């Protein structure tokens, strides 16, 4: 059975093409739920609702998580409440 850690490890390989940093480090992932039946639900956000790469990132996430052994279904829920606010550590990494 896949685990939350398995999903997180895969998501570390999904980079925002505009920023060049993975979606985990960017703190886009709010929640991951892995059911015993192989269903993975991911709650995430983007820097802005107008993110031009949003749909592409969602499809890449679905495709990569689907490759994990035991995953039968992947759902990605993109939310903007709460709005994305990078931590101080991430701000320092980004230079803002």
Image (cartoon, rainbow, N blue to C red):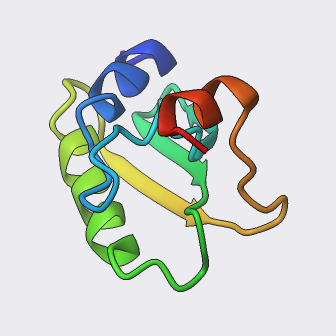
Residue 88 appears left or right of 5? right
Of residues 21 and 35, the one drawn nearer to the viewer in this rendering: 21
Image spot of residue 56 (x, y percent)? 26, 71
Tally of marks: 0
Quadrant of the image containing the N terminus: top left
Of residues 26 and 13, the one drawn nearer to the viewer in this rendering: 26
| Displayed quadrant of residue 66 | top left
Please give the name of the residue rendered at 28% of the width and 40% of the height, measured from the top-left corner.
Answer: 65
Image spot of residue 46 (x, y percent)? 55, 63
Of residues 92 and 44, the one drawn nearer to the viewer in this rendering: 92
| Displayed quadrant of residue 64 | top left
Q: Name above or below for residue 82 compared with residue 37.
A: below
Image spot of residue 89 (x, y percent)? 65, 23
Please give the name of the residue rendered at 74% of the width and 29% of the height, measured from the top-left corner.
Answer: 88
Q: Residue at the right extreme?
A: 82
Please give the name of the residue rendered at 36% of the width and 63% of the height, measured from the top-left corner.
Answer: 58
Q: Name above or below for residue 1 compared with residue 34.
A: above
């Amino acid at each position: 059975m896949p685990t939350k850690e398995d999903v997180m490890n895969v998501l570390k390989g999904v980079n925002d093409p505009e920023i060049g940093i993975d979606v985990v480090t960017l703190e886009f992932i709010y929640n991951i739920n892995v059911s015993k039946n192989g269903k993975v639900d991911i709650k995430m956000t983007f820097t802005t609702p107008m993110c031009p790469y949003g749909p592409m990132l969602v499809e890449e996430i679905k495709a990569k998580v689907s490759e994990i052994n035991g995953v039968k279904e992947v759902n990605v829920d993109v939310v903007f409440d709460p709005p994305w606010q990078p931590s101080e550590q991430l701000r320092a990494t980004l230079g803002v």
